[in-house]
Image (cartoon, helix red, strand yellow):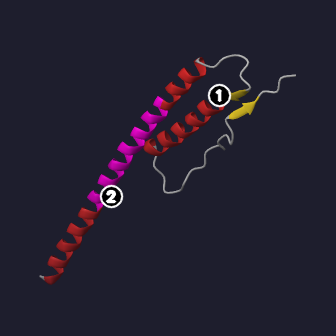
Amino acid sequence: MKKIILYALLSGVSALAASSCYADQESEKRYLTAIMTELENIKALAIKAESTRTEGDRLVFDYASLERDLELMRQAINQHIEKPSRQPRRIGALSENYTEQIHNE
């Protein structure tokens, strides 16, 4: 009888741990999806900002690098959502600098 009670208790604890893990994964998935949405919003803002740029600016923002980095982050997050892995995945290097000074000659 003690073995049955012990087995039932352990089964209940295992089921609780599994459901807790599943709930945590779903919460993480929701947050990661929200981050992807925010990355899309940032991309849209970058496109609007780039459209306001004027010729002759001495300091130029590198919008292409920013968009490339946002896409790398979005792809990495999407890959984790679609195919979670215990091992961290590497993504390409992000740009170190988004501004460039134009030298007038």
Label 1, on which residue? 64
Extent of the magenta region: 18-41
- Marks 1 and 2 sit apart, C-alpha to C-alpha, by 39 Å
Rendered residue at 20%/75% (across/down): 7
- How busy is the neighbourhood of tag 2: few (under 14 within 10 Å), some, or many (20 plus)? few
- How busy is the neighbourhood of tag 1: few (under 14 within 10 Å), some, or many (20 plus)? few
Relative to 54, 80 lies left or right: left
Q: Which mark is residue 26?
A: none
Name the spot of residue 90 as percent of width and height, x first: 60, 49
| Secondary structure of residue under mark 2 | helix
Which image quarter holds the N terminus?
bottom left
Name the spot of residue 9 as percent of width and height, x first: 19, 73
| Secondary structure of residue under mark 1 | helix
Q: Which mark is residue 21?
A: 2
Chain-order first, disc 1 or disc 2: 2
In the displayed structure, 90 sits above or below 56; it is below
Q: Nearer the viewer, residue 10 or 52?
A: 52
Q: Nearer the viewer, residue 7 or 88?
A: 88
Name the spot of residue 55 as percent of width and height, x first: 70, 16
Residue type marked 1 = Ala
